[in-house]
Image: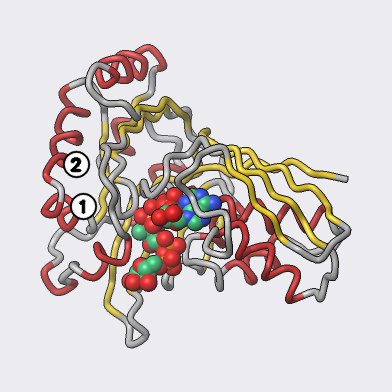
Amino acid sequence: MHVIEKARAKINLTLDVLYKRPDGYHEVEMVMQTIDLSDHLTLQHLEEDRIEISCSVPYIPTDERNLAYKAAALIKRTFQIKHGVHIHLDKKIPVAAGLAGGSSDAAAVLRGLNRLWKLHLSLDDLAHLAASIGSDVPFCVYGGTAIARGRGEQIERIHHTPPHVWVVLVKPPIAVSTADVYGALDVNAITDHPNTMAMLESLQANNPVAKISEHLGNVLERVTFRMHPEVERIKKKMYEFGAQGALMSGSGPTVFGIVDRESRAFRIYNAFRGFSREVYLSRFL
Ligand SMILES: C[C@@](CO)(OP(=O)(O)O)[C@H](O)COP(=O)(O)OP(=O)(O)OC[C@H]1O[C@@H](n2ccc(N)nc2=O)[C@H](O)[C@@H]1O
Ligand SMILES: Nc1ncnc2c1ncn2[C@@H]1O[C@H](COP(=O)(O)OP(=O)(O)O)[C@@H](O)[C@H]1O
């Protein structure tokens, strides 16, 4: 008995930080968008009471530190399930990139085990559980377009037909810690808060990409740019190569560019392939 789930990457079209909370987290407001770049998960029922993880790449832990493991352990604990699961992760989303790859794997495990073990939970039930795994996991349970608030776990889904937008992603070969980036952010020094509602209205009005691009904004960019100037250079190149809009996703270091035409996206993709190893072509989903 097995089920297959796709775990899709996200990008942040806006990322605003409102204040630092007493619990150490930052109160955020972000427009999140699922893109067509996914890990593939296979969940195989085991009669024995254990969680096994295997992975297509060697540099991700396969023990309880893996977010997919945490999700399976949470389901087993919450619903007192006495058998187990083998989870294979076929990784395609770059790791520690600002694209929520691990969070999306965890969300896919919640959805997959709900089916495998016939738990009859709604997506809202799963998203509620997901918050204890990580701030980005509830959004990944739903996917699509949403506004995320709180520490990222409060999701307002946006039901619309997503505009046709091509996305080129470039991940420089550096590791960025989300905790370090939030830790180095001086909330009182933020002057360029993005306009969440303007972005939302632009998406819902199905505006052309050039218009949507006017509202892209991420207050963590400055912090990551300071730590790793090459990330800012990639953003500049993205515009030089013809992107209509460009932004760092999440805490970085991936930078995405958006365009309305496939041919233009291919040109940018090919231009980056000359000197970047990790370049991806994708679309809004
Ligand atoms: C920046 C964002 C934007 O979508 O994504 P990534 O760059 O990780 O993809 C998210 O806010 C990341 O969410 P996620 O990666 O799930 O974070 P968590 O595991 O919950 O938290 C990691 C650490 O980041 C800091 N953190 C996280 C979220 C938040 N609203 N405020 C914080 O200060 C905390 O120090 C926390 O210990
Ligand atoms: N299933 C998983 N896939 C990727 N990374 C994982 C996973 N489980 C745990 N991790 C760890 O989580 C960290 C962040 O990974 P990831 O979710 O890809 O990044 P981000 O939050 O920047 O999008 C990495 O250091 C990685 O070792």
177 up-or-down from 242: above or below: below
Q: Is residue 52 visible?
A: yes
Viewport quadrant of the N terminus: top right
Q: Determine which quarter of the picture holds residue 238.
A: top left
Residue on which disc 2 sits: 231
Q: Which residue type carries mark 2? A: Val
Dot 1 falls on a residue whose secondary structure is helix
Position of residue 254 measured from the top left corner of the image (x, y, whole percent): 31, 41
Position of residue 161 measured from the top left corner of the image (x, y, whole percent): 56, 37
Position of residue 230 measured from the top left corner of the image (x, y, whole percent): 15, 39
The answer to whether residue 212 is left or right of residue 204 is left
Dots 2, 1 in contact, CB < 8 A: yes
Dot 2 falls on a residue whose secondary structure is helix
The answer to whether residue 45 is left or right of residue 30 is right
Q: Which residue type carries mark 1? A: Glu
17 up-or-down from 233: above or below: below
Q: Determine which quarter of the picture holds residue 11.
A: top left
Please give the name of the residue rendered at 26% of the width and 37% of the height, measured from the top-left corner: 172
Residue on which disc 1 sits: 221
User: Which corner quadrant of the figure contains ligand 1?
Assistant: bottom left
Which of discs 2 and 1 lies nearer the camera? The answer is 2
The answer to whether residue 16 is left or right of residue 12 is left
Q: CA distance from mark 2 to mark 1?
A: 9 Å
Position of residue 276 measured from the top left corner of the image (x, y, whole percent): 26, 26
Please give the name of the residue rendered at 33% of the width and 47% of the height, measured from the top-left corner: 249
